Image: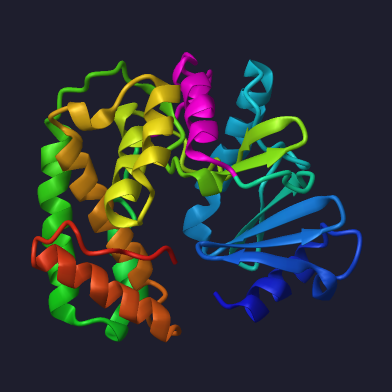
């Protein structure tokens, strides 16, 4: 789905006070995210994401009832427009500063203290999207690399299923990064709720450990995250397994953009080469 297609769907949805042409594109990934007036609209890449969109709306309502600061839905139901899920959200006020790892840790502590909601949350299928992302990549990537990632996926899926957690299982954000925190006038707010799951709490903590090792997060920033949350996941002997699973998923996620974006193809090749070589020090770049 490119921007033009997403705008066509946005126009057909008829959820904006103005025209789709005037909406500002904020992000283009699995969702195209547009802002217009006091609304934000997410347009999903394909109909497979409809159930996830519906669950994201349910999560938003649940967090509101629990008093956890998070983005709020402007419409309670997801639409399916020309095969694309569409959800509508209240636009947050402009940020007062960039989100920091400690802001994320504060919100994760609140989420991890919650009991399960009245509706079912799925397990964190961290590797569940790998096949779809590789399929979307098609001929843009080397078939041998796709086969290698499928093999890694299967191995890490089995290893993760056998882990003994240190923390109690329960609700998690599922993609716990500072980019999914918005710091407005009233403080940090969680956004992008579509990966909420019920699983090992360690999933949410490994993300930042990987950010330190692969994406250049400064050691002092990681230390502030650990201090605020109250525990360092690297002390857990299962950390390497969840890290390897997330690296596999992150590599495959970039692959879906390789067909139309040379930068994505180059980043994919960098990532898969470092995995093949077993080099955990190769710097990866956000995409």
Coloration of the structure image: rainbow
Q: Is residue 201 visible?
A: yes
Depth order, front residue of 70/122: 70
Q: Residue at x 30, y 41 (%)?
A: 209
Start-end of magenta stretch: 99-122
Q: Residue at x 78, y 70 (%)?
A: 11
Q: Residue at x 34, y 80 (%)?
A: 265
Residue found at the far front of this picture: 220
Residue found at the far right of this picture: 17
Q: Is residue 123 visible?
A: no
- Quadrant position of the N terminus in the picture: bottom right
x, y percentage for residue 135?
31, 72
Residue 23 placement, left or right of 29: right
x, y percentage for residue 15?
82, 57
Q: Residue at x 64, y 42 (%)?
A: 182
* 279 up-or-down from 232: above or below: below
* 166 up-or-down from 9: above or below: above
- Quadrant position of the C terminus in the picture: bottom left
Depth order, front residue of 171/283: 283
- Whether residue 107 is in magenta: the answer is yes
x, y percentage for residue 89?
73, 46
Residue 207 placement, left or right of 228: left
x, y percentage for residue 276?
10, 67
Hey, which quadrant is residue 56 in on the image? top right
- Whether residue 248 is in magenta: the answer is no
Residue 92 placement, left or right of 135: right
Hey, which quadrant is residue 61 in on the image? top right
Q: How many marks?
A: 0
């Amino acid at each position: 789905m490119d921007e033009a297609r997403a705008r066509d769907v946005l126009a057909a949805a008829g959820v904006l006070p103005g025209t789709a042409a005037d909406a500002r594109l904020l992000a283009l990934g699995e969702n195209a995210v547009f802002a217009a007036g006091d609304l934000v609209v997410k347009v999903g890449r394909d109909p497979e994401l409809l159930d996830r969109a519906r669950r994201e709306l349910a999560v938003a309502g649940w967090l509101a009832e629990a008093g956890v600061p998070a983005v709020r839905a402007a419409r309670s139901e997801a639409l399916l427009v020309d095969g694309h899920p569409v959800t509508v959200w209240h636009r947050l006020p402009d940020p007062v500063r960039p989100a920091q790892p400690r802001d994320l840790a504060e919100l994760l502590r609140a989420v991890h203290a919650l009991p399960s909601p009245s509706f079912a949350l799925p397990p964190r299928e961290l590797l569940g999207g790998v096949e779809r992302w590789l399929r979307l990549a098609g001929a843009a990537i080397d078939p041998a690399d796709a086969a290698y990632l499928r093999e890694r996926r299967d191995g890490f899926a089995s290893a993760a299923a056998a882990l003994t957690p240190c923390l109690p299982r329960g609700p998690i954000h599922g993609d716990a990064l500072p980019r999914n925190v918005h710091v407005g006038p009233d403080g940090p707010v969680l956004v992008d709720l579509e990966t909420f799951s019920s699983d090992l709490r360690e999933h949410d903590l490994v993300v930042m450990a990987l950010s330190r090792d692969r994406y250049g997060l400064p050691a002092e920033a990681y230390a502030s995250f650990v201090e605020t949350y109250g525990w360092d996941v690297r002390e857990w002997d299962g950390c390497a397994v969840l890290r390897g699973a997330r690296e596999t998923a992150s590599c495959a996620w970039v692959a879906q953009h390789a067909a139309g974006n040379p930068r994505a193809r180059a980043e994919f090749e960098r990532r898969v080469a470092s995995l093949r070589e077993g080099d955990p020090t190769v710097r990866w770049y956000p995409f």
